[in-house]
Amino acid sequence: MDYQYDLFVIGAGPGGYVPAIRAAGYGMKTAVAEKDFVGGTCLNRGCIPTKTLLHSAELYGEIKRAQEFGITTAEPAISMEALKNRKIQVTEELRKGIEGALKKAKIAQIKGKAKITGEHEVTVEGEDGIQVYTADKILISAGSEPARLPIPGADLPGVLNSDGLLDRGEAPFDSLIIIGGGVIGMEFASLYQALGTKVTVLEALDKLLATMDKEFGQSVKMVMKKRGVDMHTGAMVQKIEKTEKGFSCVYKEKEKEQVVFADGILIAVGRKPCTNGLFGEKIEIQTERGRIVVNEHFQTSIPNIYAAGDVIGGIQLAHVASAEGLHAVAHMAGREEEVRLDFVPSCVYTNPEIASIGLTADEAKKQEIRVKTVKYPMSANGKSLLSSQERGFVKIVFDEETRKVLGAQMMCARATDMISIFGTAIANGLTVEDMKKNMYPHPTFSEGIGEALELA
Ligand code: NAD
C-alpha cells in the first residue's frame, strides 16, 4: 500500500526531531507533528530555560562576590522581566535552529494535535482544521508533563509547577517552599537561593536526589544548608492552604506535624507521560501506569508504531529520548544504531554541578561486581581554588580485577561537561591505565580526573 510518508513522528521534542532528521538521512520521507513549539519540554519548559536562568543567577552570585576577586562593583540587581526576556530570546533562537534543520532535511512540519486513528493513520487537528495523514511507520514521542500531587490544596490558584515558575516575570518570591527534593526541586532551590529567596525544601524520602549516588544528596544538603536553605528530608507534605500573603504547607517529619509559610510554592514531585488523547477508538496500545510499553526496538504492541522518550517512562532525560528515538528509526530502516543505552550520563545543574555515569559503588555491590572506588577532593584542585569554588569531588568506580572503568560521580564546577570523558572510557571498555595515558592539562578542572586516576 502507498502511504504519504514513510515515517510520521508525533512530538518535536528531542525524542522526535532528532530521530526524524536521522530518518530523513536514511532516505525516509518524514513528517513531524507538534501541537506547541518545536524543541519540546527540554527547550521550551525544561533544560534550556532553567539553565538560562541558572546561568544568570550564577553570574549574579559571582558579581556579589566580586570583591573576593579584586573587583569593586555597585550592588547588582536582578530584573526578572529582563531575565525572562533573555530566556525567551535563547529559546526562540534555538527553536529557529531546529526548524531550520527540519527544513533542510525536507521534513514536513505539521502544526497541531495529532491522534493515531489507524495503524497507519494519524489525524491532526490544527489551525487549518482537521487533516488525515498516512504513514508506514509512526513514532510517538509525546513527552511528559508535571505530575499532580494528590493532597488537599495542590490545585489552589498560585500553586506552581516547574512550567508555571519558569513563566513568572515578577520579582523573585521573598520566600518559596519547594515540595520534592529531586532534580527539579534541587535545581530550583539552587536558583532561587542565588536570587535571594528564602527557600524551604520538603522531601518525603530520607535523602535528596534519591536516584543518584547517596553522597550527592548528602553533599548538596550540606552546601544548601550552609547557604541558608531550610532543608527537610523525611518530610511528607500533607496539605497546602492559602494564607493572606501566600501559602502554608503542613508536613509530617519524625511523626510530628509541622507547618511552614511562604509567598510561593513549587510542586516538583516527578513527571508523567503525555498519552491523553493520543489514540483513537480503533487503536489499542498497551500501556502500564500511564506509560507506553515498548520492546527492545522501541516497538509498541502495534509493531509499526514505535515510541521513545518520556512517554515510555524510564529515565526522563532529553539525551535519553534522542538516543531511544535513534534506535527506533535505525530498527525501522534495518540499520544498527551505535549509541549505547545501558549507561546514561546524568547531570544536575545545581551550584556546584553534579554529574554521574555508569555504576556507583553501591550499585556494583548489589550486582555482586567487585569494584574499587577512588575519590579526589576538588579542594586540592588549582582551578577550583583560583576560581573560589565550593567543596566537591571526583569519584571513579572500576572493576577490581580487569581495572575497567565502570562508573564516575562528580560534584564540582564543570562536572556536567567533564562527565563525557568517562562516558567515552566506559563505552570503549577503557581501564584506569588507559585513561592515565592522557595528559590532563594544567590548570583545569579536568586535572581532578587525572589526580583521581593517580589514586587508582
Ligand atoms: P524526581 O522524581 O526526581 O523527584 C521528585 C521528588 O519528590 C522525589 O524525591 C519524591 O520522593 C518527592 N515527593 C513526592 N511526593 C512528595 C510529598 N508529598 N512530599 C514531599 N516530597 C515528595 O522528579 P522531579 O525532580 O520532578 O523531576 C522530574 C523528571 O525530570 C526526572 O525524571 C528528572 O530526571 C527530569 N529532570 C532532569 C533534569 C536534569 O537532568 N538536569 C532537570 C530537570 C528534570
Image (cartoon, grey):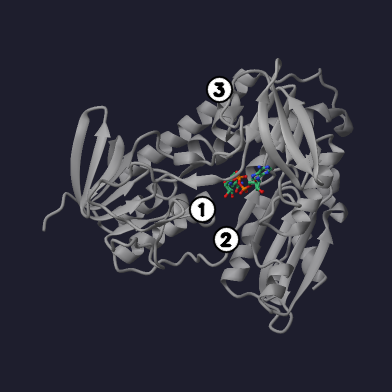
Quick one: label 2 or label 1, which is nearer the N terminus?
1
Q: Is mark 2 within 8 Å of ligand 1?
A: no
* Residue 288 vertical placement versus 13 (above, below): below
Of 282 and 186, nearer the camera is: 282
Q: Residue furthest bottom?
A: 401
Circle 3 or circle 2, nearest the eye: 2
* Residue 37 vertical placement versus 354 (above, below): above
Residue under numbered circle 1: 319
Label 2 crowd (10 A; few <14 / some 14-19 / many >=20)? some
Q: For residue 91, which numbered disc appears in the image? A: none
- Relative placement, left or right, of 133 versus 326 is left
Determine the CA span between mark 2 and mark 1.
9 Å
Residue 62: image location, x then y, percent = 78, 32
- Amino acid type, callout 3: Asn
Q: For residue 344, which numbered disc appears in the image? A: 2
Residue 265: image location, x then y, percent = 66, 29
Circle 3: element type = helix
* Residue 256 vertical placement versus 382 (above, below): above
Q: Quadrant of residue 402?
A: bottom right
Residue 444 can be seen in this image: no
Circle 1: element type = helix
Residue drawn at x 84%, y 36% as measured from the top left = 227
- Relative placement, left or right, of 374 versus 144 is right
Circle 2: element type = loop
Residue drawn at x 67%, y 40% as measured from the top left = 185
* Residue 268 vertical placement versus 284 (above, below): above
Q: Quadrant of residue 23?
A: bottom left
- Amino acid type, callout 1: His
Q: For residue 85, which numbered disc appears in the image? A: 3
Of 9 and 24, nearer the camera is: 9
